[in-house]
Amino acid sequence: MNNNRERLAWLILLVSFALCVALAVGTPLGIRTFLRTARVEQDALLEPQQGRPGLQRRGRGEILALVEPTWDVPAASAVTTDRFAQALLTVHVPRVEGELDTTATVQIYGDTEVRLISAHSPRFALSPLPHSVVLQVQAGRVRVLVSPVDDRPTKVELRTPHMVAHLEEGSYEVRVGSDASELTVRYGQAEVVSASGETVTLGDSERIGVLAGQALPEALPAERNLLVNGDFREPLSTGWSAYHDEQRLPAGEVEITDLAGRQAARFYRSGLGHAEVGIRQEINYDVRDFTSLVLHMSVQVREQSLPGCGSLGTECPIMVRIDYKDIYGTDRVWYHGFYWRAHVPPDVLYDYEQEVPFQTWATFDSENLVEVFDEPPALIKVLTIYASGHSFDALVAEVELLAEE
């Protein structure tokens, strides 16, 4: 009987000691693990840009026609567009009053279906985890801009029916058809994984097409971008020269700014009377061997005092101009302007003017300029972006002049 009591006492003592050690070691380890791995959901803002995009919250229930921006975009929500609609989805770390830090910007083009699978950020600053966004593109075309926040990287997992792409900081475009997906890296790095587990890593200005049921091909060069520093990641003096009209003061200003993780050129002025400020880039590139020439850019008009582009169509808060020489040796000019404040009669609305939403990024992709120009181009000479009018505040980002043979 005494031996049984002694064994029971030792057992209780050993179990108590083990529990004490487990609590002494496990409690701080558990707290440490929680602090390093706990996550919170990011906020998502969906803004209609053209037409009425469809939103199906959490991937079930009715599809709502979106007419106003909404922050109610929970995980698993699906966004759909017809050929007349476009939308912008921006994903942000949990909002602090007065701050908006963007981890991913998703430009959704027409005839596209996108699902926001998940978006998380570490709950605590000491966590080594990155910001994480998972997207699924079922069909259509999107552009994705991936941005770090507070020195913490952002990782985007982009899924299509034919591949999975892991995107680092950078700018990307994906096109998804019924039997293939194509990913283009404008800048950054992407690891592409096929359904069979093969991987290919893409770098700046590379692309890959993934066919259903086939092995991954090698990376190919993307369309040639004729512009330098169109993403404004370098100082404005790299590739661009700034100018302003000094005939009337105060003069307009142009500078590079960071707006919620997106680098952009900002044009602004507050005053009366006409003024103009802009940036230009000398290109001087022979394009006779190219069959396609497309201008891509994102614009945002934050303020303008004049309606439309002014009575003469020359005072847009943002206008882009391309000087070129045609195949007959004649110097020609092509324009396209953007505004948000509606025209007032009897002002004339010119065919090169485009209305954009107020204080919202709008994406512009031109038609094939080889076919749009008055005559086929032989030499692209200069591209100029400028703001004109009285008071204005506007931004431009992701400026690309893409040439394809």
Image (cartoon, grey):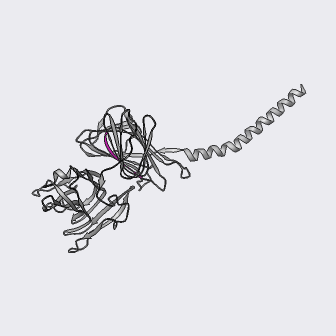
Quarter of the image where one finds residue 383: bottom left
User: Which of 268 and 351 lies nearest the eye of the viewer?
Assistant: 351
Task: State the image coordinates of residue 97 (x, y, percent, origin top left).
Answer: 43, 54
User: Which of 227 and 236 lies nearest the eye of the viewer?
Assistant: 227
- Residue ID at (19%, 56%): 336
Check residue 68 for magenta coloring.
no
- Residue ID at (83%, 30%): 8
Q: Does residue 161 lie above or below 234 as drawn?
A: above
User: Which of 98 and 278 lies nearest the eye of the viewer?
Assistant: 278
Check residue 145 for magenta coloring.
yes
Instruction: Please provide the residue range marked out in magenta.
Output: 140-147
Tell me: 166 left or right of 22.
left
Main SS class of the magenta portion in the image: strand
User: What number of labels is visible?
Assistant: 0
* Residue 64 seen in the figure: yes
**Quadrant of the frame with the N terminus:** top right
Task: State the image coordinates of residue 85 (x, y, percent, origin top left).
Answer: 25, 42
Task: State the image coordinates of residue 270 (x, y, percent, origin top left).
Answer: 26, 67
